[in-house]
Image (cartoon, grey):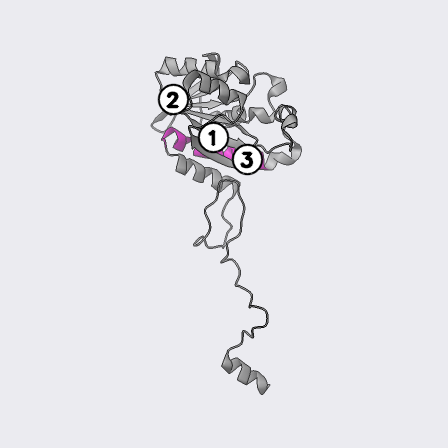
Amino acid sequence: MKLLVGLGNPGAKYAGHRHNIGFMALDRIASDHGFPAWKGKHQGSIAEGRFGSERAVLLKPETFMNNSGQSVQAAMRFYKLDPADVIVLHDEIDLAPGKVKFKTGGGHAGHNGLRSIHAHIGPDYGRIRLGVGHPGHKDRVPSYVLHDFAKADQNWLDDVLRGVSDGAPWLAADDPAKFMNAVALRVNPPRSGKGTKGDKEQTAGETGTSAASEPPAPEPGIDPRSAMQKLMDRFR
C-alpha cells in the first residue's frame, strides 16, 4: 500500500496558493478515481481507496506546512508503513512552471514541509516535485509561494493536475516511469502527424522540436543540384 501525501496549508484563504499545489493534486486524484469523502484523521484529512487492485491512502496534513511530518509519521505508524511506501507531492520553486519530476531520497532544499518530514521519518521517501517557478530572488520566495496562482497559470496547472491524476495508479503500483509518462502525455502531448523516432527524451513539461521535423538546409555556397539537374537547366 502507498501513502500519497499532498503538502499545503489548511483553510480557504490558502486554497489557491502555489504552496498548496500538493493539496490540489490529491483533490484531483480523489475526484477522478472515486475515492470516498475526506475524513479527519492522523492530524490531517485522509481518503482511502483503490486503483484497481492497488490500495492507497491519500493524506493532506492539516498541521500547517512547517509541521507536516507529524501527520505523515502518525499515518505511517497507523498503517505500519515504511518511508519507501510514502510519496510526497509538493511545490518546487527550482523547477519551471509545468515541469514535473520524480525522485527518491536526497535533501529537502529548504522546503519547510519536506524539512519537517525529514525530521520525523528520514529522507528515504519518494517525492513528486511540481514546478511552480521562482520569483527571481530568494527574499521574495515566501510571499511568492503564499500567493494564488495567476490566471495565466491556469492552463498549464490544469494539465499538470490532470497528468498527476492520470498517473496516480502507477504511483500506487510503484512504477514512477509510467507515472512520468502519463504526466508527459498531458503536459506535452505528441503532435499529430509527427513521427516519434529520434525524438529526445524530456522531463515532463519540457518542450522541444525534433531535428527530423524539417529537412536540413543546404550549406552556404554549395549548389545542391545533381549533375543531371545542372545539365538540364543549361538547356532550359
What residue is pinned by disc 2?
Answer: 83
Vertical comparison of 67 with 142: above or below: above
Asked which secondary structure carries label 1, the reply is strand
Q: Earlier in the sequence, mark 2 or mark 3?
A: 2
Residue 31's spot in the image, x, y percent? 49, 26
Pointers 2 and 3 in contact (CB under 8 A)? no
Furthest-bottom residue in view?
Answer: 235
Q: Earlier in the sequence, mark 3 or mark 1?
A: 3
Bounds of the magenta segment: 156-174
C-alpha span from label 1 to label 2: 14 Å
Residue 70 horizontal side relative to residue 83, left or right: right
Vertical comparison of 39 with 16: above or below: above
Q: Is residue 202 visible?
A: yes
What residue is pinned by disc 1?
Answer: 128
Q: Residue sitting at 33 percent across and 28 percent down?
A: 53
From the viewer's side, name the closer residue of 135 and 174. Answer: 135
Mark 1 residue type: Ile
From the viewer's side, name the closer residue of 177 and 116. Answer: 116
Q: Which class describes the residues within 10 Å of circle 3: few (<14), some (14-19), or many (20+)?
A: some
Mark 3 residue type: Leu
Q: Is residue 132 magenta?
A: no
Residue 234's spot in the image, x, y percent? 58, 86
Residue 156 horizontal side relative to residue 116, left or right: right
Vertical comparison of 38 with 54: above or below: above
What residue is pinned by disc 3?
Answer: 95
